[in-house]
Image (cartoon, rainbow, N blue to C red):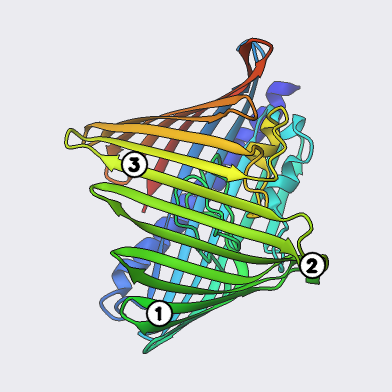
Amino acid sequence: MRVSKFHKVSTTIKFLLFYFINFILCNHLFAQNDSTKHPHKFTVNGYIKYLEEVSFAGSATDLETVDLFHNRLNFRYQPSSSFNFRVEVRNRIYYGELVQNYPGFASLVTGNTETIDLSKNWVNQNSVLVNSTIDRASAEYLHGKWDIIIGRQRINWGISTVWTPNDIFNTFNYFDFDYEERPGTDAARIQYALTSSSSLELGVSPGRIPQQNIGALMYHFNKWNYDFQLFSGIYHEDYTAGLGWAGNIKNAGFKGEISYFTPYRHFSDSNVIAATLSFDYGFKNGIYVLVSALYNNVGNDSILNIAALTTESLSAKNIFPFKYTLFAEISYSFTPILKASLGAMYSPTGNSIIILPTVTYSIADNWVLDLISQSFFSQQGATYRPLGNGIYLRLKWGF
């Protein structure tokens, strides 16, 4: 029975993958051939990825697997230099034990956190989930000093690499490495250039209910060879304000963000402060080092919940489980096509360690193979014991 079931699943996946590839190639060739008549008006690009995940807790004999075929299509239409329209779609096919055994797996993939539901589960039965999601759909108008975008988009206010407290519209999860575009939101954004090095930016994202509304005004400027940003506004049921900067101390990069939240119904109750600092430096021999630290005053410092950390969406107000967390990463390119990195997170208050090694190999033009691991450990008594491990093999073809 099990062989028959997975045979049907395999046939379905092969058919859908064949359809995706042919659809992409046809559109890609059409865009290339039509470019002489209508240069840069309509373009299509994207990728296809295959991700194999193997997860286990303490013993490697108790394995759970999930396979993912991930196709992305990016459509862009630019009728003139002032207007730009874009629609971007994710098509994902999951199958394996984890799809069936993890409670609420389909709802995690679907999301349903935006104002308009643009996600659809085509198949959700047994151990198979087929989902399509429109995560970008926007219209942009540019004229002089004005840049206006309306629709589903990414309002990227974060500066740092690992944690971004200033990113109140689109907080991302660092462990979700397979979503390099990062989440978008249904919003309106207006940017106005004051000078060549300063600007104002207004973002408004209505929620499904008033308590989910987000709106803020940001001021960008440059001073002492540093890029600064200041913002203030409303985040759900809180007043919020923040500061961010990016610059250099000699040859090392120096970035930081701090955000503050306080309820507007009961001012000064349950105040939240999230702050991060990071330094990065590239050595002449090709070694790159990144060090970052996070302070989150509402961190509960309980035993690490892996499922919540790796699968659920974090928020700007509660950006990480622990009060204090340190991160360090070292990477090195052995050749132009082979790169390896080793990252680690440590929480002295949460008594947790997370190890994050990655190896990337460029097989050919637009073909990349990644081997990624995430291992979680928590202190129990005098020793650190494994809580869970995930090993991922990913093949990506971009076009």
Rendered-image quadrant of the N terminus: top right
Residue 164 visible in rendering: yes
Q: Which residue corresponds to the image point at 42% horizontal and 78% vertical from the top-left? A: 199
Asked if the residue at tag 1 contacts the one at tag 2, i.e. Cβ–Cβ closer than 8 Å, the answer is no
Q: Which residue is mark 3?
A: 367
Considering every residue shown, the one lying at the far front of the view is 268
Q: Nearer the viewer, mark 2 or mark 1?
A: 2
| Mark sitting earlier along the chain (2/3) | 2
Question: Could you tell me how far apart the alpha carbons at marks 2 and 3 are, in whole angstroms?
Answer: 44 Å
Rendered-image quadrant of the C terminus: bottom left
Considering every residue shown, the one lying at the far left of the view is 284
Q: Would you place residue 101 above or below residue 258 in this image?
A: above
Q: Would you place residue 306 above or below residue 398 in this image?
A: above
Percent x, y for residue 162?
49, 44
Q: Which residue corresponds to the image point at 42% horizontal and 64% vertical from the top-left? A: 27
Q: Which residue corresponds to the image point at 29% horizontal and 53% vertical from the top-left? A: 248
Q: Which residue is mark 2?
A: 211
Kind of residue sitting beneath label 3: Trp
